[in-house]
Each structure stands twice: as C-alpha cells, then as structure tokens.
Image: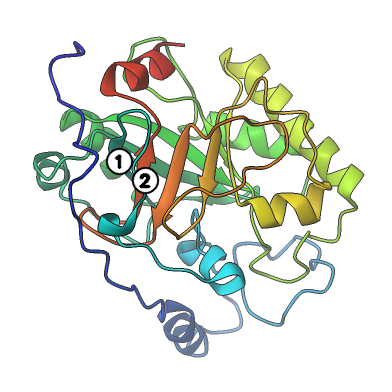
Amino acid sequence: MSSTSRSARPTGTTRPVPTRRRTALAALAATVALVTAAAAPAYADDPAPVGASTELPHPEIDFAGSTIAAHEGGTADRSAIRPFAVTQTAGMDVSSWQGSVDWATAAADGADFAYVKATEGTTYRNPSFAQQYNGSYNAGLIRGAYHFALPNRSSGAVQANFLVDNGGGWSADGVTLPPALDIEYNPYGATCYGLSQGAMVAWIHDFSDTVLARTGRYPTIYTSTNWWSRCTGNNGDFGATNPLWIARYSSSPGTLPNGWAYQTIWQYASSGTFPGDQDLFNGAYDRLQALAAG
C-alpha cells in the first residue's frame, strides 16, 4: 500500500462523539442466572483476584478503555480537540463488543487504522477476531491485534505467548501494527491486580520481552497516565522502546507517563464516527506506514 493510496484526515474535521452507555454487564448477569451450574465460566480454574468483586467473568465487555471512563471520567468532542503541531491520522479500536464491523463504511468515513482485541488473560479469544482483523485489512486499513492483560492470572510471558499464538503476530508487510498490550484498571477487583509497583513493572517487562522475542517488535502499550502512575510508580523503562497508546477522554492527551516524550496513538473517545473507540495516530499516514513496516 503506497503512502498516497489513502490521505490523512484533516486536523480540523469535526466529528460528534455521543456518549456510549455500557449496560451489557447487567444483561450478562441476567443471562448467566439462567445457565445451569454445569456451565463453567471462562476462568473457572483461575484463582480469584486479590480484592475481587463477586462478578462473574465478562471478557466480552472488557476492551481498551472499558475501565477508563468509570475511574477517570471525561468526554471528548472532536471539535474540542486542541490543534496539533503535526498531522493526525484517524483510526479506531474494536472488540467482540462491536461484533461484525462494516469495514467498508469505516474506511469510507476516514478510518486508516484499527487495533482489534484478540485475547484476554490466558483463555479468552475474541470470537469476532477473524472478521474484524481480516475485514479491516480487506478494506485497506493498517491493523494490529491487542491483548487485555490480567496480570494476576499468569506471568507476562504466558499471556504474551497466548496473544502471539492467537492472532497477535507481526510481519514486515507494511500493513500490520505491532502487537499491543492493554494494561488498565482491573475490571474484577483491586486496581493494580494485587501486584506491587515493582512486580507490575516486572510483569510488563516479561510480556514485552516475550513479544519481542516472538515477533521482532516491542509491543505498543495501551494505558492511562493515572493508572500507570499508581500501579507502576510512573516507571520510565519503556519509553525508548515501546510505542505509547494513551487513553484520555479530553481535549488533549495531557501529561504522559514517565519515559514517553510523545504518544504514538491517542484514544480520545469511546464512541464517535467509527464503530468502537476513536483514536488518532500522532503523524501523517506515511508515518503510520513506517510504524507498521518496523
């Protein structure tokens, strides 16, 4: 795909961003109540998280940013985003929450890239992954796969291998983004998954180093500054190697975690023009191609 095959989105384009209400957890609980006791949950063999709630597993509604608004609040309107010094390229991220995505329409509306949830923890695989990952490629988008981390369930290496083995690989074809690690607030209990700051940093290193060994690329890290500060002690080890995908629903990306001088991708809203979450790549389309090419 050449750098002239798709144009970058103008920085001043206005896109309304309505609020998305997430009610699936209540619906899921009602559904589970009808299931017989013989039906095993996805994490039946996993230990309960430290400080865990009594909620049943719900990986279908865990996705990049699914915990951010509840903990940090904020809304974003594309028209309110402050001007950038460089061109921004529009994209999106999706999970099984979106189901079958109309990729042709997303591309026509201006999406140039997408991250697709592939896995969570050590057992969950997105049932819509093939349609979303292959469909985005067929529509001309540069795409990549991400993993929703549950650091108290296994080592980072185990979850990194699970991602790579289930769609999270990388090839130097110019249309595949580095695999991504989604590390955010625990949807099942204690914010930092019961890990100390040092243990969390070690877990992320374990995941990152394993992805590098398996694919030749350091993974993109999705997180928020608040979570990163609280759960890693604002560790600065990863800024020189791992692209940053920052979550902040406001008029700018705000203060970034220690070690990163700039964000590679900014998730600025949970809904908008495209299905799923709304993202901006921090650069023109040819820079997005360069990230994919390695």
Residue 283 vs residue 294, the one in the foreground: 283
Mark 2, Cα crowd under 10 Å, few <14 / some 14-19 / many 20+, is many
User: 10 Å neighbourhood of mark 1: few (<14), some, or many (≥20)?
Assistant: many
Examine the rendered structure and indicate whether residue 287 appears above or below residue 65: above
Q: Residue 206 lies in what quarter of the image?
A: top right
Q: Residue at x 74, y 71 (%)?
A: 189
Mark 1 and mark 2 lie on one chain; the one further toward the N terminus is 1
Callout 1 touching callout 2 (CB < 8 Å): yes
Task: Give the CA distance from mark 1 to mark 2.
Answer: 5 Å
Instruction: Say above or below: 219 vs 290.
Output: below
Q: Which residue is mark 2?
A: 279
Q: Is residue 276 above or below residue 85?
A: below
Q: Position of residue 138 (x, y in %)?
A: 17, 29
Identify the amino acid type marked 2.
Answer: Asp
Amino acid beneath label 1: Gly
Quadrant, the N terminus: top left
Q: Is 262 on the left-hand or right-hand side of 10?
A: right
Residue 153 seen in this snapshot: no
Classify 204 as above or below 35.
above
In percent of width and height, residue 46 lies at 76, 60
Residue found 78% across the figure and 46% down from its top: 154
Color scheme of the displayed model = rainbow
Residue located beneath label 1 in the image: 91
- Left-right relation of 27 to 244: left
Residue 29: give x, y in percent of width and height.
51, 85
Q: Nearer the viewer, residue 13 or 24?
A: 13
In terms of secondary structure, where does tag 1 sit? strand
Q: Position of residue 122 (x, y in %)?
A: 65, 47
Is residue 245 something one can see in this rendering? yes
Residue in the image at 62% along x and 76% along y? 56
Residue at image x 67%, y 39%?
Answer: 159
